[in-house]
Image (cartoon, rainbow, N blue to C red):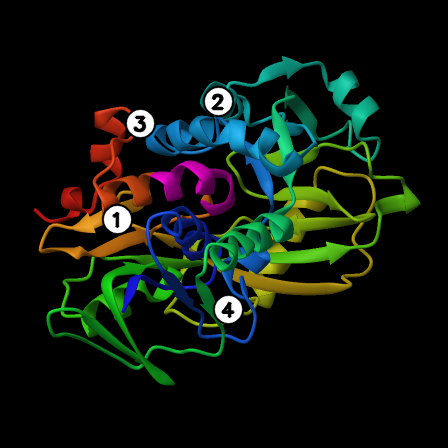
């Protein structure tokens, strides 16, 4: 008998499984042949404490110590620069307040990122509290913790049926029996819930596309910040000597192995090109991922009110990696009956109970 059966081998499932592995036997089921195949493998990999709604910011801040210190730390300084056109003063000011950024002179922005276009750049702000996340090592360390505590991580295990008969019985190539079921299936969490006889919570998968470009103008990008267009209309992030550019779309799509919409990507690249002096002459590769959102845009963590043996770890919405240490600890606390260090109002804002009205 498994104590905690986790469905989903992305950051949500592996982090929850790692926390729970100190309290009983854990098995994680991943439908694909590799961990973190979908959203977790297509992340922007940025840690910014002030990014997200209030409940997400609380999780970010509660995750910071783990990210910086645990196992030597998973963060590398990156900085985040907000840039706006001359006609975007109101949008820019709102973003500065939301992200708690420091306004800088456009000349300072040009010194940091020499390809910015002085003819279109009207405003700039900087956050020195942003970091790159070593997402692969974080995923693998959580998986290593599960295995080290006697648990299992099983790939190529697509769930095809779930029933409750005093315990959970899950068919996924073979039959698994468990006391508690953790639903961390990303865009497929509502489908898993329906299989289990639990009401869905209205998760909406939304596509976000990405293109990898050669280093613009042959520049060394290692010291550049990640750039975010005002209103979150595009971003550009240095990555291993290349530049990742996203149109920042959030288009609802069915759960799937996402692919890029060429027109949406082209529009996003055009918004980026408007702010720089180096045109996009070549896209090396492009891809898309799904970010999963609850109706109110924040995570869904904890036991379902109708059956406390069915536990949600869902709705990460693009915040999955940066919230994972605190979100997984909350899932473990609520599952095992431990007392969480998070404020009660934050726990309530994350609870599936809020969606059962």
Secondary element under disc 1, as helix, strand or loop, is: loop
Please report whichever mark, 3 or 4, sits nearer to the chain's N-terminal start: 4
Please report whichever mark, 1 or 4, sits nearer to the chain's N-terminal start: 4
Please report whichever mark, 4 or 2, sits nearer to the chain's N-terminal start: 2
Taking the spot 50% from the left edge, 60% from the top edge, the residue there is: 147
- Which residue, given by chain and number where applicable, does mark 4 sit on? 258
Secondary element under disc 4, as helix, strand or loop, is: loop
Secondary element under disc 3, as helix, strand or loop, is: loop
Label 1, label 2: how far apart the Cα atoms are: 27 Å
- Which residue, given by chain and number where applicable, does mark 2 sit on? 90
Along the viewing direction, whichever of 122 and 63 lies nearer the viewer:
63
Callouts 3 and 4 close, C-beta under 8 Å: no
- Which residue, given by chain and number where applicable, does mark 3 sit on? 342
Q: Is residue 36 above or below residue 341?
A: below
Is residue 228 left or right of 352 when viewed as pictured?
A: right
User: From the image, which quarter does the N terminus lie in?
Assistant: bottom left
- Which residue, given by chain and number where applicable, does mark 1 sit on? 295
Label 1, label 4: how far apart the Cα atoms are: 21 Å
Taking the spot 48% from the left edge, 22% from the top edge, the residue there is: 90
Q: Is residue 136 above or below residue 193?
A: above
Give coordinates of residue 262: x percent, y percent: 60, 67
Label 2, label 3: how far apart the Cα atoms are: 34 Å
Give coordinates of residue 228: x percent, y percent: 61, 35
Residue range corresponding to the magenta coloring: 320-329
Furthest-bottom residue in this view: 173
Label 4, label 2: how far apart the Cα atoms are: 34 Å
Please report whichever mark, 2 or 3, sits nearer to the chain's N-terminal start: 2
């Amino acid at each position: 008998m498994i104590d905690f059966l986790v469905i989903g081998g992305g950051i949500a499932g592996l982090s929850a499984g790692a926390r729970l592995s100190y309290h009983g036997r854990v098995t994680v089921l991943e439908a694909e042949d590799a961990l973190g195949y979908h959203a977790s493998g297509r992340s922007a990999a940025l840690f910014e404490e002030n990014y997200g709604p209030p409940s997400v910011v609380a999780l970010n801040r509660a995750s910071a110590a783990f990210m910086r210190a645990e196992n030597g730390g998973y963060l590398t300084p990156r900085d985040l620069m907000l840039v706006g056109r001359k006609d975007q003063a109101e949008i820019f000011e709102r973003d500065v307040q939301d992200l708690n950024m420091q306004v800088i002179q456009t000349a300072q922005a040009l010194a940091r990122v020499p390809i910015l276009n002085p003819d279109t750049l009207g405003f700039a702000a900087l956050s020195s509290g942003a970091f790159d996340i070593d997402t692969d090592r974080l995923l693998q360390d959580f998986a290593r913790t599960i295995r080290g505590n006697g648990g299992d991580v099983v790939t190529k295990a697509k769930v095809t049926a779930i029933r409750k008969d005093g315990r959970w019985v899950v068919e996924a190539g073979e039959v698994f029996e468990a006391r508690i079921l953790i639903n961390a299936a990303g865009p497929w969490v509502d489908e898993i819930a329906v299989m289990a006889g639990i009401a869905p919570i209205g998760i909406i998968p939304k596509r976000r596309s990405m293109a990898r470009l050669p280093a613009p103008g042959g520049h060394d990008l290692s010291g550049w910040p990640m750039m975010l267009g005002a209103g979150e209309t595009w971003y550009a992030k240095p990555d291993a000597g290349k530049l990742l550019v996203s149109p920042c779309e959030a288009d609802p799509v069915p759960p799937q192995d996402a692919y890029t919409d060429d027109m949406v990507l082209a529009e996003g690249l055009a918004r980026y090109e408007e702010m720089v002096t180096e045109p996009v002459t070549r896209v090396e590769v492009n891809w898309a991922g799904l970010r999963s959102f609850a109706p109110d845009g924040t995570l869904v963590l904890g036991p379902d009110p109708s059956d406390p043996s069915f536990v949600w770890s869902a709705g990460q919405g693009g915040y999955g990696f940066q919230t994972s240490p605190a979100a997984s600890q909350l899932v473990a606390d609520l599952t095992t009956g431990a007392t969480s260090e998070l404020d009660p109002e934050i726990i309530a804002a994350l609870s599936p109970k809020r969606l059962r009205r």
